[in-house]
Every structure is written in structure tokens, then in C-alpha cells.
């Protein structure tokens, strides 16, 4: 048992550290996921939505530090109680999301390893089992390193976590796990991969012949049978492959201009997913950047999900020399974790992506 407890201790500790770091690398993305959980359609605690970012940072820092505390054996009773309560909460949350089909991706490992709620629930069950083993056998959890150093290790861990969180909030995630990372071509990612598997369906055809019901099941071919056609029931067997990017679009006055815009040889994209909550200080820096870009032959385009009235108000307030196009808010949040954020593209390939705070670093 002592050996098993030692292995479980290291495994659980490392898993919590990795999970915490991945989310700490992108606290804004995790806050979006918390907002989804807090919404009326899931937990119905919308009053927490404005505090989602603060809650996200506190949760992931605590998660990461708990992993360190478990490995070094600092305050084992407090650590194991905290781990147990945390895993019980997240096991309930993932089961609720999976059973009622509320949230499609649990957000446990951010964009680094997307998991369905059911996959996350099974993962949490394994963790719950391991944590219970540790909880009831904590006598085997002995300190690593000199006990007097533990407080300094934990203090330093907290400080480094908050410094790292501040850095990624003021800039962008240090590691970009999303499909819109620098180097990817959006147009190519919107195409189906070669040799892609198509979705498969089972069709149940219903006919009536002399008052007798006839049912024929196949993969879609219309049956050659006598009798009156009644209807068909379609059941999805496997979803098949999908493009890496399937929901990105750029519209102007209701017209899809995605390929036209992305095909530009030199494109500067200003992404502001919601102009109501945008950081307006960013537009002062962006105005100078857009002026330089236009002089160098760039096409400058703003992307937002906000109404035309808000677009015109922002343009007038900051005397912007570019217009806004319409896109999906969720997609724009995925593209860049800044509101506004800045990208440069060449024929659909993302060459640079920065927080508005770093607009001066854009190389035109």
C-alpha cells in the first residue's frame, strides 16, 4: 500500500500541476468556460459572471499549488481535504454537464487537451478514487525536503503563479494551443482534410403495403420495394471528420466576404469581440498602428460581433480610419485573448498576434 500511495501521490500531484498550469497560461479562456457554467442554462448563477476572471485565477493557482503541496508533503491533512472537496465539486459539475448535455467541453485542460464532459467525468472518477486512497492513507505521506523549506516553496509558488497570471493577462498566453496560433493558415484550416471520413447515418425507411408496415434499414439508398412510402428515420452513427475551423466567417451587410478578406497579401485584423466591453485605451494605440499599416499597403479590417451603431460610435470616438466587419463573438474570443487584439496575415496565414498593449511590437 505504501508504494501505491507513493505512486498515486506523484501522479495526482503532477496532474493537478499540469492542469493548473495549462489553465493559468490562459486564464481568460478559463473564465469564458466558467461564464458558460455560471449561465442560466447550466447552473443558473449569473451573478458570478462578472467575477469569472478573478474566480478563474484563484481556482487555477490554488489547483497548481495544491499539486505542489501534495508532492512535497506540506500540510497533508489540509491538502487532502482541499483536494477531496475540489474533486467532489468538479465530479458533480462534469456529471451534471454530461448528463444534461449542458457544456460540450469541460475546460479541464484548456485548449491543450479538449475533453468532452463524459471523458472529464470518467477522469474525475479515477482522480476521486486515487484521492480517497491518499486521504485514508495519509500516514504514508511523508515530507520531501527539509520541512522548514516548505513554507518558502509554497510562498514562492504562489508568487510565481500570480506573476505569470499578470504577464499573460497583460500580453497573451505564453503557449497558444488554439487553431488560430501564429503560423496557421485560416483558409487551409477551413477545408476538409484529405481522406476525411464522412459522417455515417442509419436510415430506417417506412412503407405500408396492404395495411402492413414494412421497415428497411440501410445506409441511405432508397429501397426498391412495393408499397406506399410513409417516412424515414435518420440516426447518426458517427460524426466523421470536420475541418479544424468550421465556424469562422466575415460578413459585411449580410454578405460573406471571408475568402476575399483573408486572401489579402497584407492584412491587419483588429479583433474586438464586443465593443461594449472593449478596453477603449487600446484604440488609441491601434489608430497609430492602422495609419502606419495603410501607408504600407495593408488592408485594415476590424472584426466584431457588436451592432452597426456601436461600430459607428467607436469609429467616431477615436476617428478610426478602418471599418468593422461582422463575425461570431465566440470565435473572436478564441482567436485572440484581448479585446481589442491585433493580428497580421498574409494570404490567410497568421504571421503575428499580439495584445493591444503590445501594438508597438507589430512589425509591418
Image (cartoon, rainbow, N blue to C red):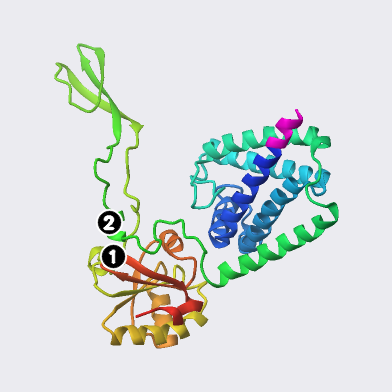
Q: Quadrant of residue 206?
A: top left
Q: Image point 48% across, 46% down: which residue?
A: 114
Q: Residues within 10 Å of mark 2 (few under 14, many from 20)?
A: some
Q: Is residue 45 above or below residue 89?
A: below
- According to the image, label 2 marks what residue? 188
Is 25 contained in the magenta span? Answer: no
Which residue: 66% across, 59% down?
55
The picture places residue 137, in percent across and down from the top left corner, at 80, 33
Q: Which of the labelled discs sits on residue 101, or is there none?
A: none
Element type at mark 1? loop
Dot 1 crowding, Cα within 10 Å, few <14, some 14–19, many 20+: many
Is 359 above or below relative to 32?
below
Position of the N terminus, as image quadrant, is: top right
Quadrant in which the C terminus is drawn: bottom left
**Percent of width and height locating residue 359:** 45, 79
Residue 111 can be seen in this image: yes
Q: What residue did someone put label 1 on?
A: 348
The answer to whether residue 176 is above or below residue 314 is: above
Specify whether 359 is left or right of 321: right
Residue 3 part of the magenta segment: yes
Majority SS type along the magenta span: helix
* Residue drawn at (64%, 60%) of the image: 57
Q: Are marks 1 and 2 in contact (CB under 8 Å)?
A: yes
Distance of label 1 from label 2 (alpha carbons): 8 Å
Of mark 1 and mark 2, the one earlier in the sequence is 2
Residue plotted at (65% across, 55% down): 60
* Residue 321 appears in the figure: no
Who is closer to the viewer here, 234 or 247? 247
Q: Is residue 46 left or right of residue 318?
A: right
Task: Compare residues 147 and 349 and report the one nearer the observer.
Answer: 147
What segment carries the magenta color? 1-7
Amino acid at each position: 500500500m505504501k508504494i501505491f500511495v507513493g505512486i498515486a501521490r506523484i501522479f495526482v500531484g503532477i496532474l493537478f500541476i499540469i492542469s493548473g498550469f495549462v489553465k493559468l497560461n490562459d486564464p481568460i479562456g478559463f473564465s469564458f468556460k466558467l461564464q458558460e457554467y455560471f449561465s442560466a442554462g447550466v447552473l443558473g448563477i449569473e451573478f458570478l459572471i462578472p467575477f469569472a476572471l478573478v474566480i478563474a485565477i484563484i481556482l487555477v493557482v490554488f489547483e497548481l499549488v495544491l499539486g505542489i503541496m501534495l508532492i512535497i508533503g506540506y500540510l497533508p491533512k489540509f491538502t487532502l481535504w482541499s483536494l477531496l472537496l475540489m474533486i467532489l465539486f468538479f465530479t458533480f459539475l462534469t456529471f451534471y454537464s454530461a448528463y444534461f448535455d449542458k457544456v460540450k467541453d469541460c475546460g479541464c485542460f484548456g485548449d491543450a487537451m479538449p475533453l468532452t464532459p463524459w471523458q472529464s467525468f470518467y477522469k474525475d472518477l479515477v482522480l476521486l478514487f486515487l484521492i480517497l486512497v491518499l486521504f485514508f492513507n495519509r500516514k504514508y505521506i511523508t515530507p520531501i525536503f527539509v520541512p522548514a523549506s516548505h513554507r518558502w516553496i509554497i510562498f514562492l509558488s504562489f508568487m510565481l503563479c500570480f506573476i505569470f497570471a499578470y504577464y499573460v493577462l497583460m500580453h497573451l498566453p505564453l503557449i497558444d494551443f488554439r487553431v488560430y496560433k501564429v503560423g496557421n493558415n485560416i483558409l487551409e484550416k477551413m477545408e476538409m482534410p484529405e481522406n476525411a471520413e464522412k459522417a455515417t447515418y442509419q436510415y430506417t425507411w417506412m412503407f405500408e403495403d396492404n395495411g402492413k408496415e414494412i421497415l428497411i434499414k440501410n445506409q441511405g439508398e432508397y429501397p426498391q420495394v412495393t408499397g406506399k412510402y410513409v417516412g424515414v428515420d435518420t440516426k447518426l452513427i458517427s460524426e466523421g471528420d470536420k475541418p479544424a475551423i468550421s465556424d469562422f466567417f466575415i460578413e459585411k451587410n449580410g454578405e460573406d466576404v471571408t475568402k476575399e478578406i483573408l486572401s489579402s497579401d497584407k492584412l491587419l485584423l483588429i479583433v474586438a469581440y464586443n465593443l461594449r466591453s472593449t478596453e477603449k485605451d487600446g484604440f488609441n494605440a491601434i489608430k497609430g498602428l492602422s495609419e502606419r499599416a495603410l501607408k504600407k499597403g495593408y488592408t485594415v479590417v476590424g472584426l466584431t460581433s457588436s451592432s452597426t451603431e456601436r461600430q459607428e460610435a467607436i469609429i467616431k470616438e477615436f476617428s478610426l480610419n478602418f471599418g468593422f466587419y461582422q463575425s461570431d463573438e465566440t470565435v473572436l474570443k478564441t482567436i485572440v485573448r484581448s479585446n481589442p487584439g491585433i493580428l497580421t496575415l498574409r494570404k490567410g496565414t497568421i504571421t503575428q498576434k499580439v495584445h493591444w498593449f503590445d501594438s508597438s511590437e507589430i512589425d509591418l
